[in-house]
Amino acid sequence: MSIKNPIIVALDGMSWDQVLPVVDKLRTTGCILKVNDLLFREGFRNLLPKLSVYGRVMADLKCHDIPNTVANTCRNLRACPPWAVTVHGSGGKEMIEVACKELQSVGTKVLVVTVLSSIDPKTCEEIYHRKPAEQVMELAQIAKNAGADGLVCSSEEVSELRGRFPKFTLVVPGIRSSGADPGDQKRISTPKVAINRGADYIVMGRQILSAKDPVEEVNRILKNELGIYLNNM
């Protein structure tokens, strides 16, 4: 089996002093490092060079603004390009296009957020007047037309998306091992189910970060749940 590690570790709500010892350990696993609020506290030009030493970085900005503002934001990422940046699909085709244009030359993937995994079906219909799967497919088509590289979606939609958009990079948040605390996520899944349905990457946070040994927990998930063996095991 491929030795690619599909785990993205969400470093949410942490200071740099808290993040540093964790990423220093995780660098041996090949996990992608996802940051959002820390980017604003530390600043793009300060954090990205420091964090990139420890692995690929997903800048989870979830950009959702007028195209000019999103272009300015993405332009600021080019000094130290992350592996990927997220933008909201509901921002529309033009907004996604400018993000792609600004980052194309540096190779950063533009991943379009569809329906947040914290949104349940009832809330989705209140906001979008569609069921989650319908809204996800609508936004996925917009993302494709805009030239995006992939999507952020729940495990519930990933199988159909893989069939419709085979070239997309599909990132699935809301991932927990069976029996783990779901936290604030509503549309959740286990690592094995998400990967088997077609996810390229899975986002996990609290389960790994709260473990006594985060590296051991990553290796346990990879080995016992996904059948992946890394060189550090």
Image (tube, helix red, strand yellow):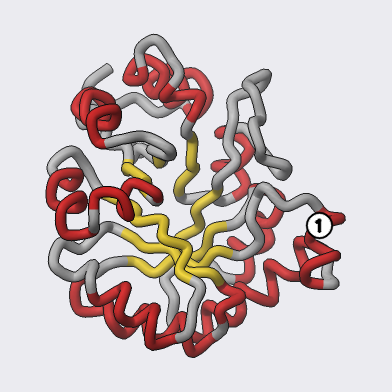
Foreground residue, 75 or 201? Answer: 75
Q: Quadrant of residue 194?
A: top right
Q: Which residue is drawn at 82% across and 54% down?
A: 121
Q: In which quarter of the image is the C terminus?
A: top left
Say left or right for 77 vs 53.
Answer: right
Say left or right for 47 vs 88.
Answer: left
The answer to whether residue 63 is seen in the rendering is: yes
Foreground residue, 46 or 140? Answer: 46
Say left or right for 144 vs 178.
Answer: left
Q: In which quarter of the image is residue 162?
A: bottom right
Residue 142 vertical position relative to residue 74 in the rendered view, above or below:
below
Reading the image, the residue beneath label 1 is 123
Q: Which residue is drawn at 64% across and 23% down?
A: 181
The answer to whether residue 7 is seen in the rendering is: no
Q: Position of residue 85 (x, y in %)?
A: 37, 63
Residue type marked 1 = Thr
Q: In which quarter of the image is the N terminus?
A: top left
Q: Position of residue 6 (x, y in %)?
A: 41, 41
Q: Is mark 1 on a helix, strand or loop?
A: helix
Residue 177 vertical position relative to residue 8 in the rendered view, above or below:
above
Q: In which quarter of the image is residue 191?
A: top right
Q: Where is residue 59 in the image (x, y as percent from the top left)?
A: 34, 56
Residue 223 vertical position relative to residue 15 in the rendered view, above or below:
above
